Image (cartoon, helix red, strand yellow):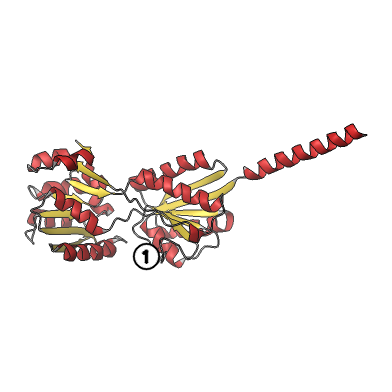
Amino acid sequence: MVKNKLSFVAGALLALGLSGQAMAQAKIEVGVTWAGKSGATTRLYTSMKDRLQEIAPQISLEYVGEQADIAKVEETVKRFDSSKAATVALRDSAATLLAKLKTTNPAFVGGTNNPMFYGTIKNLQAPEGNVTGVTYFIPKDIIIRSFISLMPEADSLSFIGDSKHSSYQVDKEGSEEACTQLKLRCTFHAVTTADEAKDIAARNPAGAKALVLMNHGLLIDNTKVIVASAGKIPTFAFGDASVKDGAVAGLVADVSKLGVMLADSINDVLVKKKPISAVPVGLDNQPLLVINMSSVTQLGLSIPLDILATANILN
C-alpha cells in the first residue's frame, strides 16, 4: 500500500513537471509584416529571427513581408492582432499606421525613423501605449558632425530627399535644426524622380561644398547615377546602401544590432511578461561610420587616420 502511494505521488510529481515544462515551451505565435522591398529591413528581420531562435525558441513567427502597399499591411496587422500573441510591423509606413490603428495585443516597430515623429509612441523610454520596438534614428546633428569631421571645409550642404517618402519631413526638419546649431549654410531639394535628383546633383544650384542624400528608396536605388552626376562634388548619405554605391560616407545604425535588440524586446514582453512601459524603444548608441574609400580616393579627400581606424571601410 505504501509503495503504491509513493508510486502515485512520484507519478503525479513527474506529470506536474512535464506539464510545467510543456507550458514553458508552449508556442507563442507572432506575426511579422512590412510593405515594399528593403534590404535593410530584411537584414533586421533575419537578425531578429536568429536571436529569437536562440533565446526564445517557443516563439513562432509567421512572416508576411514585402507586401504591395500599406493597405495590405493594415489587413495583415488586423488579422495578426486577432490571431497572434503580438505583431511586428516594420518600416516607416507601418509606424505611421500603428499611430492610428490601435492593436489589442502588443505590437513592435523596427526599420523606422523616430516613432515619436509619427505619433506612434510619445515616450521612447517608457512607451505609454501598446507599442515598443527599435528605431534607426540618430540625431541629425551627430550625423552631420561626422560628415564635417571628414571634410571640415564643407560649410554649406545641399540635401536631396524624396518628398513622397514618409520620413522626408522628419529628416528635413531635423537637418534644418542641426544646420542652424552647427552654423552651416544648408539648402533642401525635394524631388520625386531620379532625373530630378540627377539634375540637382549636376547643377548644384546652391553652390554647396557637398551633397547629402536622405535615406529614401528613390535615392538609394539611384545613388550611382546621382554620384556620377555630382562629379567632383562629394556626396554623403544617411544610409549605408548609398555609401556602398558611391557616396563618400554615412553614419548609420547597425541594423543587425537593432534586430537583436528587437528580439530581446519581444522576449521581454511575451516571455518575461514585462509591461510595454518597462521596455524602452531601442536605439543604436554607437552607430557605424561607413566610408567608401574608392570615392574618397577618386575625390582626393584626406581622411584623418584616427577616424579611419574606427570606421567601417568599404573599398
Residue 2 lies, with reference to residue 213, above or below; the image says: above
Q: Which residue lies furthest to the front in this view?
A: 2
Front position in the image: 188 or 156: 156
> Which image quadrant: the C terminus?
top left
Residue 153 percent across, percent down from the top left: 7, 53
Extreme residue in the top direction: 3
Q: In the picture provided, is 229 more to the left or to the right than 46?
A: left
Using the image as rendered, state which of residue 262 and residue 187 is in the foreground.
262
Rendered image quadrant of residue 99: bottom left
Left or right for 159, reference 138:
left
- Give how far across and how far down residue 88 sits, in percent: 47, 53
User: What amino acid type is highlighted by mark number 1?
Assistant: Tyr
Which residue shows up at 46% across the image and 41% down it? 51
Tell me residue 133's x, y (percent): 43, 55
Quadrant for the N terminus, please.
top right
**Can I make out residue 245 in this image?**
no
Residue drawn at point x = 49 percent, y = 43 percent: 52
Residue 246, picture quadrant:
top left
How many numbered marks, from 0 up? 1
Label 1 CA crowd tier, 10 Å (few <14, some 14–19, many 20+): many
Give the residue displayed 15% in from the left and 39% down from the top.
Answer: 305
Looking at the picture, tell me which residue is in the foreground, 211 or 161. 211
Helix or strand or loop: what does disc 1 sit on? loop
Asked if one can make out residue 294 in the rendered structure from this viewpoint, the answer is yes
Residue at mark 1? 118
